[in-house]
Every structure is written in structure tokens, then in C-alpha cells.
Amino acid sequence: MIAREQTMGRGRDGRSWISPRGAGLYFSIILRPDKLELSSWPLLTLMAALAVRDALEETVGLETDIKWPNDIMGDGRKLCGILAETIETDTGRAAILGIGINLDEHAFPLDLEGIATSVTELTGEKPNRQRLVQALVSAIEGRYKTLQAVSGKEETIDAWTRHSSYADGRHVRVATGAEVFEGVTRGLEPDGALRVETVIGELRTVHAGDVSSLRESNVQGPKFKV
């Protein structure tokens, strides 16, 4: 399902997702990964992040960073958010992937300019919405097929690691809701959880939470194809 506007858009932890008419691409898709065990379903968000990155590179030549687990970043600011929810249906369990991409500066309030950005700001022109949708659907189809292949989980984690500056060696602050701690990222677990080595040398596994960089100058900025 594709929407030009959302009046009750939601982000993680029940937060609202601002979705003004025509300013962003708001996309939801239902997936039924019958070849993926439930414990590996968190990898669907990593897969979706890779698909968004693929689509943006293909359509506007923009290379983006991925902040764990699935925020798409440009110039150190948030360009796209992804939310995955598991639901029970009459035909079995399914996952709903919601994707919101900021297309222009009207996609977010002025007071968020320091932490949010848009495709138009990063590239200098507003993208062709239809072309971006087609590329995104195609990219999801390809990445989803890969994820469910024999070695798909490993391939997905490897691809995510290659395209994320947050994967390894990044100084971060982690807020889980129950606590806040700092450390250095040390890769991903097989289910997509983030490994973080704390300042006292303890290796922590983060399954859910907010991760922020403590060295923003190292965030990858946008690059363009020549």
C-alpha cells in the first residue's frame, strides 16, 4: 500500500511519524516469510533498509548510510524510517513493513532540520515518485528472495555490515528504555542484534533500542554517481 499522506503515522515505540501530503513516500507491505524461522524475522528490517538504500542509489544516485537497525541516513541526518510489526492473520503470522522516505523539506518540521534531511536537499532535485516506488518494490523483492535462500541470512548481514558505518568500531550511546550505556559497536549477531563493547570491556547484545553516534563527524555523507 502506498500513501501520499498519513494522518496517524507511527514510528518505533508508538512515536508519531510526521507524514504531510506529497512531501514523502509512505509505503507499507505485508510479508509472509515461510522459509525464515521466527527467531530470524528481525532480519526483515535489515533487509528493508538495504532495499531502500538500493532504490535510492538506483533512482537518484544517492549513497546512504544505515544506522542500526534500519534508519537510512544522509549527511548524518535521518532520511528514512522503517517500522516492522508482526501480526496474526487468518492465514498465519505475517510481518508488516512500513517505510517512510522524506522526499522534500516539507516532510518534517523546521525544528528537526538538524536531525532530518530529504532526498531533494541531498541531491538538489525532487525525485520521480513513481520511479522510486518501482525501484523500491523491485529491491525489496530481490533482497527478500536473498534473505530466504539457503545462505541468505549470512548474506543479508554481510551486505548490511558493508553498507553501514555503524556496524563495527563506531562509538555509540545505546538507550534501551531500561538503561543507557556507551560503547563501541562490534558487529551483528546472526539474528541481527547489535554487539556493543562497553567502556569496561563487557560485550553487550542489543536487540532493541535507540543507537546514536558519539562521533558524528565520522557519519558517511551522501555521495553521487558521476
Image: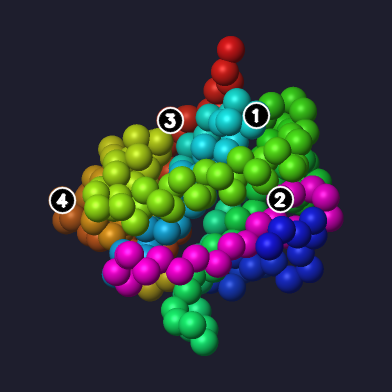
Q: Would you name the residue on which mark 2 appears?
A: 25
Q: Quadrant of residue 116?
A: top right
Drawn side of residue 4 relative to residue 67, left or right: right
* Residue farthest along the top direction in this orientation: 226
Give the answer, above or below, for where 164 lies relative to 98. above
Q: Earlier in the sequence, mark 1 or mark 3?
A: 1
The residue closer to the viewer here, 124 or 52, is 52
Residue 42 position within the rendered picture, expressed as x and y whole percent measured from the top left? 38, 63
Q: Is residue 173 covered in magenta?
A: no
Q: Which of marks 3 and 2 is nearer the N terminus?
A: 2
Mark in the foreground, 1 or 3:
1
Q: Which amino acid does label 3 sit on?
A: Asn
For the residues marked 4 and 2, what is the alpha-carbon distance in whole angstroms? 42 Å
Residue 175 position within the rendered picture, expressed as x and y whole percent measured from the top left? 41, 62
Residue 144 position within the rendered picture, expressed as x and y whole percent measured from the top left? 43, 53
Residue drawn at (79%, 56%), measured in percent from left and top?
Answer: 4
Any part of residue 35 in sight = yes
Q: Would you name the residue on which mark 1 appears?
A: 60
Assess whether mark 1 and mark 4 are in contact (beta carbons under 8 angstroms): no
Q: Which amino acid does label 1 sit on?
A: Val
Drawn side of residue 77 relative to residue 188, left or right: right
Magenta extent: 18-38
Mark in the foreground, 3 or 2:
2
Q: Would you name the residue on which mark 3 appears?
A: 218
Drawn side of residue 90 relative to residue 33, left or right: right
